[in-house]
Amino acid sequence: MNDAQFASMVRTAYADNPSVPEKHPLRTVACPPLTRFPAGVTEGWTAEEQSHTQACAYCQKVTAMVWKEQPPPWGTMASYIADPELCPELRAFQIYVGSKGRRYYGLVRQFVEASSTRGLLGEALKAALEHTAGFFTPLPVPETALATATEDASSFELAKTFPDLGVSITLTNAPTGNLTVSLSADRRYGGRNVQVTVFGSGEPLQAGIRLNMGDSGAHGRHVFGPAAPLLNRLGLDCLVTASFVDD
Ligand SMILES: [Zn+2]
């Protein structure tokens, strides 16, 4: 995306506010170019950029705007929610959760609250996050979920791989009509128990899964049950987490 495209996106986002000027009055000469933001926000700033952007009202607004297109990683959100004092981009986060980010914020907040009831607070939560895989994923609309199990439209497979952890998580609505979570992991996880939680609108789905050694690594799965009522309970999107914290 170049500067002109980004500026066009910003104007589109504020299309209902004709008073938005071409050049934002809060912008300073020290602000990184707009084209730098998507990479800076998602992959990290240089130390010099970071010290400016976290203190600059304009850069915090633009950071929030980037997050509206591409939500912050759920683990980053979790550490922000758990410890707002230490959040370097608190203003951007507040702008983000006040608008389009509210839905994702609600999912991650459930994770943080569930962790705190298990005694995972502060540093313990941060340590646990390093051993927890998770991803946001949209789910089929309930009408689709209510279709009969034999229709292709009701089947789906949502998979995510975490190379750093050596783990893959797959959420499927199998042709049998059952909502299932499957885990594939490095051999080092053989024999381990993994706690999987799916956070959505209603009560989260939870499963303790034991990983058994196979030829190609450690594998485990859990069948939550008939997909249609479970998908209705979860809503339009969810946060899937798998915790590889030592027992
Ligand atoms: Zn700035």
Image (spheres, helix red, strand yellow):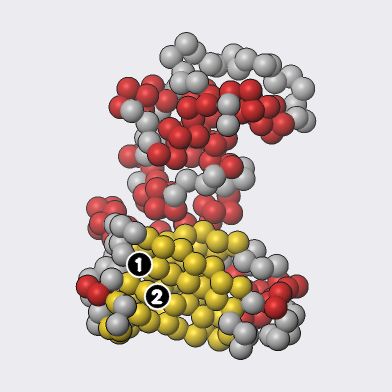
Residue at the image point whose x is 63% and y is 23% from the top: 4
Disc 2 packing (10 Å; few <14; some 14–19; many ≥20): many
In the displayed structure image, the side of residue 182 where residue 117 appears, left or right: left
What's the residue type where badge 2 is placed? Answer: Leu
Residue labelled with disc 2: 183
* Mark 1 and mark 2: Cα distance apart in space: 7 Å
The reply to whether the C-beta atoms of the residues labelled 1 and 2 are less than 8 Å apart is yes
In the displayed structure image, the side of residue 197 where residue 120 appears, left or right: left
In the displayed structure image, the side of residue 240 where residue 150 appears, left or right: right
Figure quadrant of residue 214: bottom left
The quadrant in which the N terminus is found is top right
Residue labelled with disc 1: 167
Residue at the image point whose x is 34% and y is 63% from the top: 132
Can you see residue 137?
yes
Report x, y in % for residue 65: 57, 35
Report x, y in % for residue 10: 65, 29
Task: In this rendered view, identify the residue nearer to me: 122 or 207.
Answer: 207
What's the residue type where badge 1 is placed? Answer: Val
Q: Secondary structure at mark 2?
A: strand
Q: Residue furthest bottom?
A: 176
Report x, y in % for residue 81: 42, 49
Q: Residue furthest front?
A: 215
In the displayed structure image, the side of residue 204 where residue 117 appears, left or right: left
The quadrant in which the C terminus is found is bottom left
Disc 1 packing (10 Å; few <14; some 14–19; many ≥20): many
